[in-house]
Image (cartoon, grey):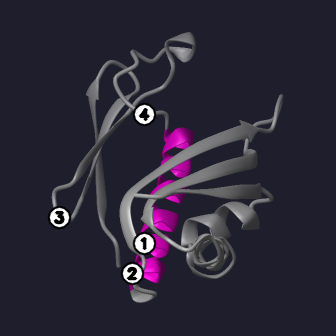
Amino acid sequence: MINIELNRVQGDFGFEARDANGHMVKMDSSPESGGENFGVRPMQMLLMGLGGCSGIDIVSILKKQRQQVDGFKMHIEGEREPGKEPSLWKSANIIFELTGTIDIEKAKRACELSMDKYCSVAATLKGAGCEITWEVRVVAG
């Protein structure tokens, strides 16, 4: 079982969440909705989780294929459902940018496996109706 502790520490909506290992994340609402810009918006954190989850998958798969991943960057853009409560993620697009001695076909396959099979965050978002698209760019290292 996973345990998370959340405490309000600043203003009305400034929270710190801490896991059982002591790792901490700050969250807040936007100033337009009464927050103080103290931390990440909770819905943005879902996209960050998508990036972290798929990144771990992809690097792990490529390492097993003896690909040399010298650098890894992602750009994630999401769009939420307008005018709804709750406003879920409608779509997300990811650009995976890998640097190193990496076969582009192996990189594409690793991304496909992550997005369609291994990434629990992607599966969670897809289960809520989010369409996830992605592309891979490899730059020689």
Tell me which residue sits at (67%, 60%) in the image. 125
Callout 3 amino acid: Asn
Query: Circles 3 and 4: CB distance less than 8 Å?
Result: no
Callout 4 amino acid: Val
Circle 3: element type: loop
Q: Nearer the viewer, residue 101 or 69?
A: 101
In three-dimensional space, the C-alpha distance between marks 2 and 4, rounded to whole angstroms, equals 31 Å
Mark 1, residue position: 59
Q: Position of residue 110 (x, y in %)?
A: 58, 77
State yes or no: residue 45 in magenta: yes
State yes or no: residue 56 in magenta: yes
- Would you say 97 lies left or right of 20 here? right
Q: Nearer the viewer, mark 2 or mark 4?
A: 2
In three-dimensional space, the C-alpha distance between marks 3 and 4, rounded to whole angstroms, equals 20 Å
Tell me which residue sits at (74%, 64%) in the image. 126
Callout 1 amino acid: Val
Callout 2 amino acid: Lys
Based on the displayed image, in which of its 4 quarters is residue 23 positioned? bottom left
In three-dimensional space, the C-alpha distance between marks 3 and 1, rounded to whole angstroms, equals 23 Å
Q: Which residues are magenta?
A: 42-63
Mark 3, residue position: 21
Say which label, 3 or 1, has the lower sequence index.
3
Mark 4, residue position: 40
In three-dimensional space, the C-alpha distance between marks 4 and 1, rounded to whole angstroms, equals 25 Å
Marking on residue 63 = 2
Query: Circles 2 and 3: CB distance less than 8 Å?
Result: no
Say which label, 2 or 4, has the lower sequence index.
4
- Would you say 60 lies left or right of 87 here? left
